[in-house]
């Protein structure tokens, strides 16, 4: 027995025992084959935002099918304005973000969110025209809608139909 616990043979036996143990661990350990995207409820964030701003807030009436809301926050924008951010993983596992603010100038807010100040066209969503912006080096597409008291921005690596899908579920919520 001593021959198998010392020298080269001892090293080989120890290595085989370790490899067998690692193999058994890999076979027994649960293995997830799908990416897990954490779901974050944004209803309280939207309600708090609605109580802190002097205008009606826009928010999804429901999440687009197979989309996962994965981030939300309220932040300070320029000139003391509040900004609401809602982030999503789309059904195609791309990123989309909805942001809104009454920041002035509205064009400055939209340009900052889009990383571009140049419109490349318009897109009709539910009978409403949204301005399209595109930044090629970041693969970032953006839809912008300027309203009298708030600017709505939908941006991300999602394609145009996905961004339009998010725009189609937005609805104005009453103040308060």
Image (tube, rainbow, N blue to C red):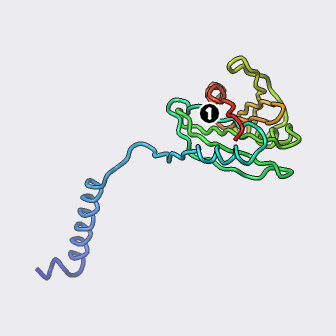
Which quadrant of the figure has residue 9?
bottom left
Judging from the image, what secondary structure is the residue with disc 1 in? strand
Does residue 51 appear left or right of residue 41 in this picture?
Answer: right
Q: Image point 62% across, 42% down: which residue?
A: 87
Q: Residue furthest left?
A: 1
Give the percent coordinates (x, y) of residue 16.
Answer: 23, 66
The residue beneath circle 1 is: 60
Q: Which quarter of the rendering shows the N terminus? A: bottom left
Give the percent coordinates (x, y) of residue 104.
Answer: 87, 42
Which quadrant of the figure has residue 43?
top right
Give the percent coordinates (x, y) of residue 130.
Answer: 76, 25
Does residue 148 appear left or right of residue 171 in this picture?
Answer: right
Number of on-image labels: 1
Residue nearest the observer in this picture, 89 or 58: 58
Residue nearest the observer in this picture, 10 or 162: 162
Q: Image point 30% across, 55% down: which residue?
A: 29
Which quadrant of the figure has residue 150?
top right
Q: Image point 37% across, 47% down: which residue?
A: 32
Q: Residue furthest right?
A: 105
Residue nearest the observer in this picture, 84 or 28: 84
Name above or below for residue 76 compared with residue 143: below
- Give neighbour class at mark 1: few <14, some 14-19, many 20+ (Cα, 10 Å): some
Q: Residue furthest top?
A: 127
Give the percent coordinates (x, y) of residue 97.
Answer: 66, 40
Q: Which quarter of the rendering shows the C terminus? A: top right
Does residue 150 appear left or right of residue 89 in this picture?
Answer: right
């Amino acid at each position: 027995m001593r021959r198998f616990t010392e020298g080269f043979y001892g090293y080989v036996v120890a290595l085989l025992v370790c490899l067998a143990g690692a193999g058994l661990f890999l076979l027994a350990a649960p293995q997830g084959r799908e990416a897990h995207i954490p779901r974050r409820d944004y209803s309280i964030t939207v309600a708090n935002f609605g109580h802190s701003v002097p205008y009606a807030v826009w928010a999804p009436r429901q999440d687009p099918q197979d989309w996962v809301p994965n981030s939300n926050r309220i932040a300070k924008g320029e000139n003391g304005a509040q900004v609401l951010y809602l982030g999503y993983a789309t059904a195609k596992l791309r990123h989309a973000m909805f942001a809104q603010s009454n920041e002035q100038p509205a064009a400055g807010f939209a340009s900052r969110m889009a990383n571009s100040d140049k419109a490349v066209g318009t897109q009709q969503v539910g009978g409403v025209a949204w301005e399209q912006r595109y930044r090629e080096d970041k693969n970032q597409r953006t839809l912008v809608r300027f309203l009298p008291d708030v600017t709505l921005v939908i941006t991300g690596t999602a394609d145009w139909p996905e961004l339009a899908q998010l725009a189609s579920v937005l609805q104005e919520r009453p103040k308060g």
